[in-house]
């Protein structure tokens, strides 16, 4: 049985020079954050260059991709890049992968007919390469006789998931799952789906770590906190996720439909269509006490980590990190 720790991580959006982001990362480590997670998008700074730079300036914080798009990088290359960061950081690398964001279909004309198979192929190759060599022939990816020329280890692999099939797959093949949603009904749903996947291959569902990615806005004026966070939930609440999840999120179907229609049409400001219920499902907004209590609730629900996403300039995020330090220390003690 794995240690049932609860860790708080920080999402770092790579939209600033790496030198500036390194300062944020160092402050996060000082403030008790145990993990730093970085997106892999071509329009941002390179994720592995950023992680390598930050690895040299930190000591203990773990470094993960949230997430690396397998369509952008062959899984063997993901394994190699992650292992390079792992070597540089003395064993602090985590692999988070997904099937790719909106740009793959909209900008690149690339869209897998079966994201499930895409990720199954990817995990098989990543695990093979890290275990000493891959001999795998898949539908989307193959790696025959693919080996690293230096020593490696089995770096944890986490899947980005929301719906039933992908969370079930995480139970079958992954070490953890990065999810989107924090209401109790959804957390229970994720646990049930993980159990289905884990049981199918004789695994223990307790060994698959659940980790929500959460937008956070701390303000003692809760109404203002809600107003400030709503623009940040445009895609999380109004993106292309399946309508079958609406009852799991316990949301109003008509409200979701209106929001998705506006987002799809490119309406620039949809804040008025994001309901308070959506805020409570996809984020934590309110006082320091509320943030602390919500994190404790998630910890007690069996969630193993949370990844907090903050807003503002780099300096504003650093200030937010410092202000969160007492909460992080208390919740993780």
Image (cartoon, grey):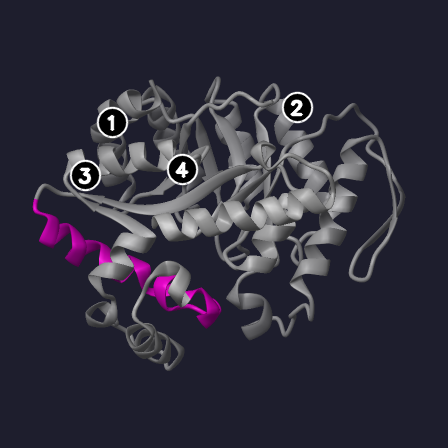
**Nearer-the-camera pick, 253 or 81:** 253
Residue 316, x across and y down, in percent: 23, 40
Nearest to N terminus: mark 1 or mark 4: 4
Q: Which label lies toward us, 1 or 2? A: 1
Nearest to N terminus: mark 1 or mark 2: 2
Are the residues flagged by discs 1 and 2 in contact, CB closer than 8 Å?
Answer: no
Q: Residue furthest left?
A: 221
Location of mark 2 (residue) = 87
Residue 325, x across and y down, in percent: 26, 25
Residue at the location (52% across, 23% down)? 56
Q: Is residue 286 visible?
A: yes
Q: CA distance from mark 4 to mark 2?
A: 25 Å
Q: Using the image, tell me which numbered label, if any, was put on residue 290.
A: 3
Magenta-drawn segment: 221-245
Location of mark 1 (residue) = 327
Mark 3, Cα crowd under 10 Å, few <14 / some 14-19 / many 20+, is some
Residue 244, x across and y down, in percent: 47, 69
């Amino acid at each position: 049985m794995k240690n049932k720790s609860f860790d708080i991580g920080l999402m770092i959006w790579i939209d600033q020079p790496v030198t500036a982001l390194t300062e944020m990362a160092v402050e996060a480590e000082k403030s008790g954050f145990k993990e730093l997670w970085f997106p892999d998008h071509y329009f941002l700074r390179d994720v592995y260059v950023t992680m390598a730079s930050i690895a040299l300036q930190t000591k203990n914080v773990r470094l993960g991709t949230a997430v690396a798009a397998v369509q952008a990088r062959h899984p063997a290359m993901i394994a190699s890049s992650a292992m390079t960061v792992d070597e540089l950081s003395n064993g602090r690398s985590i692999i988070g992968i997904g099937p790719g964001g909106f740009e793959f279909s909209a900008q690149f004309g690339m869209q897998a007919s079966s994201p499930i198979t895409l990720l199954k192929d990817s995990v098989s190759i990543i695990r093979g390469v890290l275990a000493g060599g891959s001999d795998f022939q898949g539908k989307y990816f193959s790696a025959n006789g693919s080996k690293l020329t230096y020593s490696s280890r089995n770096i944890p692999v986490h899947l980005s998931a929301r719906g039933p099939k992908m969370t079930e797959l995480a139970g079958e093949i992954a070490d953890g799952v990065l999810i989107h949603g924090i209401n109790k009904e959804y957390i229970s749903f994720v646990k049930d789906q993980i159990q289905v996947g884990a049981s199918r291959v004789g695994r223990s569902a307790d060994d698959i770590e659940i980790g929500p990615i959460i937008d956070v806005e701390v303000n003692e004026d809760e109404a203002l906190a809600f107003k400030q966070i709503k623009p940040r939930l445009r895609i999380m609440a109004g993106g292309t996720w399946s309508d079958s999840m609406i009852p799991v999120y316990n949301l109003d179907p008509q409200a979701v439909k209106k929001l998705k229609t506006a987002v799809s049409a490119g309406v620039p400001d949809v804040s008025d269509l994001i309901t308070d219920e959506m805020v409570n499902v996809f984020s934590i907004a309110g006082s320091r006490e509320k943030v602390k209590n919500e994190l404790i609730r998630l910890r007690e629900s069996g969630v193993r980590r949370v990844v907090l996403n903050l807003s503002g300039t780099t300096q504003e995020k650093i200030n937010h990190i410092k202000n969160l330090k007492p909460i992080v220390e208390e919740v993780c003690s």
